[in-house]
Image (cartoon, rainbow, N blue to C red):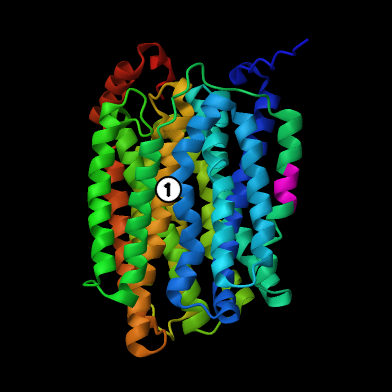
Amino acid sequence: MSVAPPVPTALHTLSRRRRTGILLICSLSLLIVSLDVTILNVALPSIGHDLHATVSGLQWTVDAYTLVLASLLMLSGSMGDRLGRRRVFLVGLGLFTAGSLLCSLAPNLGLLVLFRMLQAVGGSMLNPVAMSIVTNTFTDPKERAQALGIWAAVVGVSMAFGPLVGGALVDSVGWRSVFWINIPIGIAAIILTTLFVPESRAPHARRVDPLGQVLVIVVLTALTYGIIETPNRGWHSPLILTCAVVTVVGATVLVRWEKRRDEPLIELRFFHSVPFAGAAVLAIAAFGAQGGFLFLNTLYLQEVRGFSPIHAGLSLLPMALMALVWPPVSGRIVGTRGSRIPLLISGIGSLAGFLMLSQLTATTSIWYVWASYAVFGVGFGFVNAPITTAAVAGMPRAQAGVASAVASTSRQVGATLGVAVVGALAASGAAQHRGLRAGDLVSGWWVLVGAGAVILVVGQLVSTPRARLSAERTARELNPEYLEGLS
């Protein structure tokens, strides 16, 4: 006699206490992913010295992870909608935890990069699926905005504790220990998810789009490889030129292919909504700024100024505290007054912070450095809640996994490009001077100034009444019965 599979639960019908518990459990996935990024950045110089890695090698240690993550997020989001969100979430937790263990054992840079890619396969099943669970659990717009503010605050927690914990571990045990912290958190998340998170899936999930998935991987890989390897090979290298051609042709073919499919990997109609399209641009700019900041800051503090890992971690506290305090406030403002004010604060804070950082020298007062970090921390602390809210506003809840995965993909594309671009500029300067100097980082800081300007301008464009009307039109195009999901 066969046993019928469990019936998926309507998450929004659960009690308030149960929904809050699900939010906290899902936030554990964001915590281990965010901790992994902040802790790893503190450990990069030690990894470079131990494994004899160049600046581009350190870039690949970061970007191999974010590249795979960005490539697979949309597939994982749709898999969660189709196969069951809890099931995919648990598989992701298992792969991420196993990948972390293997990273801690890597004997050389090549295997470390390979194991980071395994981590990323698991990581791709975490945040978009968890965000889909949260979105389907908190369906009231005000309640959802507050929940997403708490979700965003988890990034601040990782910012506050990641550099400190990472610095202490690197100084006392060595860089391999920075991967150990993911293991107990991952195991705890697996147990709690199994016990308390009910299964859910979309009534109608999208079919798999193999060609679209391959094209996404090809485009992102060619673009990232071309940027990172340009300082070593030169702009006129046949390999770099080939990467440029593959990127352009691949992107063109991807867009045309996706337009032809009834159920594409990337639902291009989502981008008819100005808030949704703007959220993608804001995510790329904001997380490109964060990824670039963490990478340049590590080089500046440890390579230029000679700080120890723990000293460098402590120096990040002003930024980390701001990123911890302000996301819940941003979420409450979004829930009650909309996205315009948080995005204005975020744009001004990011732009001002990077303008201050562009003036750093090897002897700049540490008080000035801390003030710069704090100003940028305010900007970053306000940006995540309005991005996430805009990304799901007006989108059918049945496709929450796909919609939230596009936002998550934009974040990871931004992080990948941020590290690739500023790292390439730093590597080019270091190659000319046979060693890294503060002046080699200036062009990277100015790139991040541009990212801050994008946040300021686009943030105001996506929060106008006309933009909200476009979200309503998009909702009607996609599925009229989900108009009540507009926030």
In the image, 135 versus 460, the foreground residue is 135
- What's drawn in magenta, residue-wise? 184-188
User: SS of the residue at dot 1?
Assistant: helix
User: Where residue 319 sits in the image (x, y, percent)?
Assistant: 51, 62
Q: Is residue 30 left or right of residue 205?
A: right
Does the magenta stretch mainly form a helix, a strand or a loop? helix
Q: Quadrant of residue 59?
A: bottom left
Quadrant for the C terminus, please. Answer: top left
User: Where residue 192 sits in the image (x, y, percent)?
Assistant: 74, 36
Q: Tell me which residue sits at (25%, 72%) in the image.
A: 237
Q: Tell me which residue sits at (28%, 52%) in the image.
A: 454
Quadrant for the N terminus, please. Answer: top right
In the image, 322 versus 225, the foreground residue is 225
- Any magenta on residue 262? no
Q: Is residue 165 above or below residue 199?
A: below
Of all residues, the one furthest to the front in this rendering is 1
- Crowding at dot 1, Cα within 10 Å, few <14 / some 14-19 / many 20+, comes out as many
Q: Is residue 188 above or below residue 40?
A: above
Q: Tell me which residue sits at (51%, 48%) in the image.
A: 326
Name the amino acid, label 1: Arg
User: Where residue 442 sits in the image (x, y, percent)?
Assistant: 33, 75
Q: Is residue 350 left or right of residue 190?
A: left
Q: Is residue 423 above or below residue 219?
A: below
User: Where residue 220 sits in the image (x, y, percent)?
Assistant: 36, 52
Q: Which residue is mark 1?
A: 411
In the image, 334 versus 194, the foreground residue is 194
Q: Quadrant of residue 11?
A: top right
Q: Tell me which residue sits at (47%, 37%) in the image.
A: 75
Q: Is residue 125 visible?
A: yes
Q: Is residue 356 visible?
A: no
